[in-house]
């Protein structure tokens, strides 16, 4: 009988479910989109029940697409959009409010208050994170303070908190497991990454009762077993969970210190495994937890770009200058340059290395000669230039010379973007054959725990390069492009912090 591992990849815009065989080949795939909710400018929400429904549709489609007559699912892995926050009633299972999405900026004022009161260094030293509305902590507090009766119910022990991994686990496991793992916990502003435990003092500052929080396990662990969930059979062990960016690093076989990857999705996320050693970052990067050898937590440097693929979505849905994302490569290549246009897509502020919650987007250098192809090219260049900012900070922090960058995510399939990324970084870009590295990472974690795959060395052998992009831009042109970008960013910054 054929044996597969199921990966559930619950992302910001939809859910992907993939069945992998022992060679990491995709044998079944399903996808279901989820609606975005924007109650007011800067606020982003999801309906948790629709997230769950999208998981069922995606898993059902994946199972239905398998051509093999006889197969069984050996294990389930889950990966998820991180920081997105859900609170639900532990008896009824009903969410008390829409999920507050990682992109949401509604708690920016609360973050500013915490900084004014002198708490920033305490949070940074214990969690590795800046006090920012991006993370879960102030989102939890907002729900407790703004949903009628929520704080009383939480203190009474009637409510449960989870990032999306925990929400899904609780709903698809027959045990109603209220668990998470280190990578997701490390994104909450409430988890001490040195002690590997919830931090009681930080919880007190945030105003979060500890009893709402899930148990934290290793990323490879016995999280529970499935209940009957659509076409998903009951009794399958759920043995791998990681936040999407850490799962993507695992999918790129990045278990060893020094491994680095960039995922081009709704946002852009770079992660460098730094092993067991911890060094407090000083240049706008985050310190976080990733998955090391043996499934144990390791430290990592992370740079988060809030808007990457979302800029292309905006061109499609907001400006209506393209019909679909696949047009952008041809359009960008149809012009020699951007005609002097620079786009800074700070629609929800700027992440690493600037961390400016109030920065807003701009398109600079417009003239009558600018056409839509120039705007499209500027948007793609902005994704690569934001990445270059983060890579520069990682080079500084690690002291390591970057020789190649492994990339994944939907936008990495864009050949113009991949080549321009190589040009502005001056290093090779390696695009793997399997671009579904986030889902693959979740599958690897689950399968390694059950013995479906033997060890990390076997995973490394499964990783294959599809195409390598080598830099073609000369040093002078690269410096001019980066200087032009820095000048544009300076115009939208409100905190005037720059690396």
Image: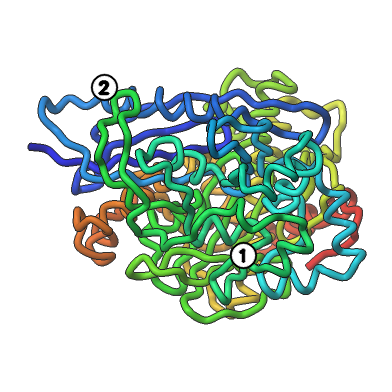
Q: Position of residue 326 (x, y in %)?
A: 52, 27
> Quadrant location of residue 332?
top right
Q: Residue at x 53, y 35 (%)?
A: 91
Crowd class of label 1 (few under 14; some 14 to 19; many from 20; radius 10 Å): many
Disc sitting over residue 191 in the figure: 1
317 or 420, nearer to the observer: 317
250 or 337, nearer to the observer: 250
Q: Residue at x 87, y 53 (%)?
A: 493
**Distance of mark 1 from mark 2, alpha carbons?**
40 Å
Disc sitting over residue 64 in the figure: 2
Q: Position of residue 52 (x, y in %)?
A: 48, 29
Give the answer, above or below, for where 425 lies relative to 384: below
SS at circle 2: helix
Q: Earlier in the sequence, mark 1 or mark 2?
A: 2
Q: Residue at x 54, y 71 (%)?
A: 196
Q: Is residue 340 visible?
A: no
Q: Position of residue 79 (x, y in %)?
A: 45, 46
Q: Residue at x 72, y 75 (%)?
A: 282
């Amino acid at each position: 009988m054929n044996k597969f591992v199921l990966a559930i990849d619950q992302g910001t815009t939809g859910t992907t479910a993939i069945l992998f065989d022992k060679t990491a080949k995709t044998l079944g795939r399903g996808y279901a989109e989820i609606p975005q909710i924007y109650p007011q400018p800067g606020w982003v929400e999801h309906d948790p029940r629709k997230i769950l429904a999208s998981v069922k549709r995606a898993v059902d489609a994946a199972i239905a697409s398998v051509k093999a007559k006889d197969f069984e699912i050996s294990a389930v892995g889950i990966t998820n959009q991180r920081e997105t926050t859900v609170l639900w009633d532990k008896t009824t299972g009903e969410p008390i409010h829409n999920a507050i999405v990682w992109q949401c900026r509604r708690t920016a004022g609360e973050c500013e208050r915490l900084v004014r009161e002198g708490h920033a260094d305490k949070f940074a030293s214990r969690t590795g994170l800046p006090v920012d509305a991006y993370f879960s902590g102030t989102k939890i507090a907002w729900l407790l303070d703004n949903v009628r009766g929520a704080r009383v119910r939480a203190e009474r022990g009637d409510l449960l908190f989870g990032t999306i991994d925990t929400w899904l686990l609780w709903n698809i496991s027959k045990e109603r497991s209220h668990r998470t793992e280190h990578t997701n916990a490390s994104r909450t502003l409430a988890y001490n990454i040195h002690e590997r435990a919830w931090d009681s003092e930080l919880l007190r500052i945030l105003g979060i009762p500890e009893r709402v929080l899930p148990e934290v396990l290793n990323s490879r662990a016995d999280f529970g077993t499935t209940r009957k969930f659509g076409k998903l059979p009951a009794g399958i062990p759920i043995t791998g969970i990681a936040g999407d960016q850490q799962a993507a690093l695992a999918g790129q076989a990045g278990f060893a210190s020094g491994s680095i990857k960039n995922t081009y999705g709704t946002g852009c996320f770079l992660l460098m495994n730094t092993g067991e050693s911890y060094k407090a970052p000083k240049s706008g990067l985050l310190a976080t937890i990733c998955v090391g050898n043996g499934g144990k937590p390791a430290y990592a440097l992370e740079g988060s770009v809030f808007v990457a693929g979302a800029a292309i979505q905006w061109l499609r849905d907001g400006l209506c200058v393209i019909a679909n994302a696949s047009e952008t490569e041809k359009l960008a290549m149809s012009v020699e340059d951007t005609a002097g246009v620079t786009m800074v897509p700070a629609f929800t502020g700027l992440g690493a290395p600037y961390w400016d919650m109030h920065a807003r987007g701009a398109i600079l250098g417009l003239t009558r000669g600018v056409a839509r192809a120039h705007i499209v090219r500027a948007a793609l260049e902005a994704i690569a230039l934001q990445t270059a900012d983060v890579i520069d900070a990682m080079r500084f922090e690690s002291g390591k010379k970057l020789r190649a960058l492994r990339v994944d995510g939907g936008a990495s399939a864009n050949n113009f973007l991949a080549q321009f990324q190589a040009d502005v970084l001056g290093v090779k870009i390696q695009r793997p054959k399997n671009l579904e590295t986030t889902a693959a990472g979740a599958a690897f974690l689950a399968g390694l725990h059950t013995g479906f795959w033997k060890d990390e060395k076997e995973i490394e052998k499964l990783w294959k390069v599809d195409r390598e992009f080598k830099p073609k831009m000369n040093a002078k042109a690269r410096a001019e492009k980066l200087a032009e970008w820095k000048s544009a960013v300076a115009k939208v910054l409100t905190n005037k912090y720059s690396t």
